Image (cartoon, grey):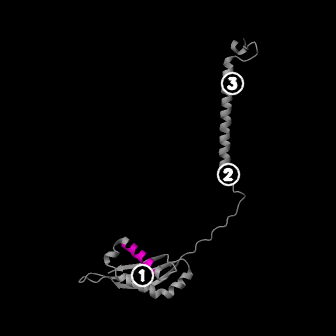
Amino acid sequence: MAGGQTVADNEQTEDGSVPAADAAAAPKGKRKLILIAAALLVVIGAGAGSWFFFFNHHGDEVHAEAPPPKPPVFVDVPDILVNLAGAPGERVQYLKIKVVLEVKDELLVEKIKPTMPRVMDIFQTYLRELRATDLAGSAGLFRLKEELTKRVNAAISPGQVNAVLFKEVVVQ
């Protein structure tokens, strides 16, 4: 036998079929071919999916952009100076406060200006009932801000103030 061939390589059965060892190798080759084809399909599918999600612009559709939000409008409230409630015989303490009202548009400003005396009355009445301990810490100022917002909204109803903002708060 020449060329390094073995007797088993040249053997064929009488009916011309391949021996059993070669028959077992044929299914392994088909399995490898199926695995390679499946891997190739996965890679092609991943590439197509990423192109679809990241690069396909669906015919360059034009979406209407939302207009930019309007900046809020601020209304100055006159400075308020009140004496705080205290027990008899205690030193009198005062509260000086500068407040700004935040509203969403200019139309609401025109509705608030005629009601400003009512807003001032509500603020003064509420602030005179406070004690210095009610204003202690950031929690006290937060509660004060919430109460003033609630009261000004009641005064200018159906209008709505977004927030009451402090410019200055002094307790003496």
Q: Secondary structure at mark 3?
A: helix
Eyeballing the image, is 99 above or below 45? below
Provide the residue designation for mark 2: 52
Residue at the extreme right of the image, as rendered: 15
Of callouts 1 and 2, the N-terminal one: 2
Q: Secondary structure at mark 1?
A: strand
Provide the residue designation for mark 3: 26
Quarter of the image for residue 94 reads bottom left
Quarter occupied by the C terminus: bottom left
Of callouts 2 and 3, the N-terminal one: 3
x and y percentages locating residue 61 in the rendered image: 70, 61
Part of the protein shown in magenta: 140-152
Provide the residue designation for mark 1: 98
Judge from the rendering whether residue 139 lies leftward or rightward of residue 91; answer left or right: right
Of tags 3 and 1, which is closer to the observer? 3
Residue 28, numbered circle: none
Examine the rendering and report whether any part of residue 167 can be seen: yes
Examine the rendering and report whether any part of residue 6 can be seen: no
